[in-house]
Image: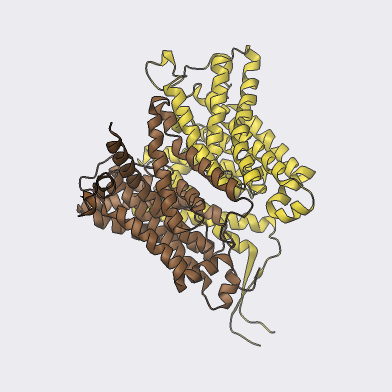
Chain colours: A yellow, B brown
Amino acid sequence: MKRPTWIQIDRRPSPSPRVVFGISLLAIVAALVVAGIFFQAYGVSAFRAYGDILRGALGSKLGITETVRRMIPLLVIGIGLAVAFRALFWNIGAEGQLLIGAIAASGIALFSGIPGPLMIPAMFVGGFLAGALWGAVPAILKARLGINDVITTLMLNYVAIYIVEWLIHGPWKGPTMRGFAYSDPFPSAAVLPVIAGTRIHWPTLMLGLLAAVIAFIWVTRTRQGFEIRVVGENPDAARYSGISQAKITILAMVVSGGLAGVAGVGEVAGIHHMLLSPTHISMGYGYTAIIVAWLARRNPLAVIATSFLFGVIMRGGDVIKVSLGLPFQLVNVFNGLILFFLIGSEILMRYRIRIGRRVEA
Amino acid sequence: MSWESWIVGTLSRTLAYGTPLLLATLGEIYAERSGVLNLGVEGMMIVGALSAFAVAYTTGNPWLGVLVSAVVGGAFSLIHAFASVTLRANQVVSGLALTMLGLGLSGVLGRRWEGWPLFTPLREVSIPGLSKIPVLGPALFEGQNLLVYIAVLLAVLLWFVLYKTRIGISIRAVGEDPATADSLGINVARVRYLCVFVGGVLAGLGGGYLSVAYRPSWTDGMTAGMGWIVIALTIFAFWNPLLGLVGAYFFAALFHLSFRLQAWLAPELLKTMPYVLAIVVLIVVARGTLQKRMGAPSALTIPYTRGEE
């Protein structure tokens, strides 16, 4: 049979890393093009906007360090989300888990009186435990009662936001803060060290990088990591092989919530040095980290790269807020578009399209 | 406060707050009945709210705003329909993306109106005759706008369509067993597109109601998580429009009554009530029905391709 041109679509068995990388890159570029059209339609030159973003995020020492500062919480949360998403638990609640971690750290910093050198480790442990507990609640509700994880994790974000609001307007309102809704500043023993002249609180960054390596080994090289994947990809197989779905789900969420809590510790102890309004503690890190984890294809090591990319985007949001007077909400437009193109492009990974001139068959 | 005015106040606030929840819940019920989970309700509501405000503000005509919110909400939902039906992308992620996009776009485009009040909100009407009934009259048939009653009628209409018409059978068939529906000559993709679109129209309307009637103004993020409560209500209603009516008002009543806790709870903690209630409501429903399954459409979140299972 002869045909002038043909298009053949067939299933791709399992895409190679190169294909995944290429298609992901294509998706991001496509999303940026659409965002560019949006810029133009809004009356802002897309070239100027992207120029400002690149220069502001990567073109100077200050830019790069601020990008890394934005990257830190995305990295720490993203690793945890990669784990939760592997178990197909939709943790949309990292924002709340982060805030609960921040509350725990603030409580320890302000009221525990733990002696100097033990203070910071205690805050990280406390933040992890608090975030883990906050994350475990929806996991238990799903494992025991079959309650939808998306809704519960999301609802708990709002609950966490208002608990912070209550604390800073009520019981924890700092007497020294002249009526502002902040807690008192942390004692110096509770302040994280930074790389000189920057806002990079390196202990959190180190914890994040370490967590990425450990989580990678855990999910790819251990039996438990394998069980997480089975629970996520094939619940029936998990049931038949005697894997406790409830245990695995809760475990994945303890890790996921705990890491988000650690990110919260980093933000209050490394950047703000007090408990303050939720919108200042987190600019939607918990939501942006969802894309970070998804783009990394749920691979904790790849989260290092993707969190840097979204660090650039968040820093870019800071920059054009000033240079072009655009609201920071623009970051959400980027996030939404990138996420759409990312999942939309996945069909290219499952299927292969081949186009040719002529074929003998 | 006399018990009469207490009842009147509670019922009329319930009706007012329950309306946007009801509208969006009805829409999500249709989308999910056809097998498409749309977590973009929050995003569709907020673009609906902004477009309704913008049009009502510039033209002075709130009904035109309401109409536009429905169109914009519907158009916006088609992104999700395209991703989940045509591209067969993950519905959870696509819905989240829609919400992010909606919140982002409305935040950027709405900034010039941030915090502005609307001087021409939907007019309050009183239903002749019915408003004369003691207690119930002033509670339910006075001081509300027409959209409130349209929402109630829509619930009944959409229930009728879903259970008593051929279209409804097609929708339910597509959501339960798309392969069989396909073999019976039902166009699965078209039904799903249509249902997602209906969901977008109603979520847009719900958002429009917020900005031109419930709180005639525009503020960034004014839906404040309502779209997520709607997702919970859809489950609470067992995907049935009439139960959606009950659920939305029941939830709104609880929400309103929680304000009676003012004496004991700090205002910030009072604000957690709708979200805590949504979780509690799901726990209550789950406890009663876990054994019998939750009654979700069998093909919910599963993309359909002919010849593939």
Residue depicted at x 44% and y 41%: A317
Question: Where residue A43 appears, x then y in whole percent?
Answer: 32, 51
Is residue B44 visible in the rendered structure shown here?
no
Question: Where residue A219 appears, x then y in whole percent?
Answer: 73, 44
Question: Where residue B278 appears, x then y in whole percent?
Answer: 49, 42
Farthest front residue in view:
B134
> Which quadrant of the structure image shows residue A344?
bottom right
Task: Give whichever of A289, A89 is nearer the camera.
Answer: A89
Is residue B308 visible in the rendered structure shown here?
yes
Query: Is B104 on the left-hand or right-hand side of A127?
Result: left
Task: Give whichever of B123, A51 is nearer the camera.
Answer: B123
Query: Is A282 on the left-hand or right-hand side of A179?
Result: right
Question: Where residue B267 appears, x then y in whole percent?
Answer: 39, 28
Q: Is residue A40 above or below residue A355?
A: above
Task: Give whichever of A346, B227 is nearer the camera.
Answer: B227
Q: Is residue B23 above or below residue A113?
A: below
Q: Is residue A68 above or below residue B92?
A: above
Residue depicted at x 44% and y 33%: A279
Query: Is A15 on the left-hand or right-hand side of A111?
Result: right
Farthest bottom residue in view:
A1
> Which quadrant of the structure image shows residue A152?
top right
Which quarter of the rendering shows the C terminus of chain B?
bottom right
Counting every numbered tag in the picture gives 0
Which quarter of the rendering shows the N terminus of chain B?
top left
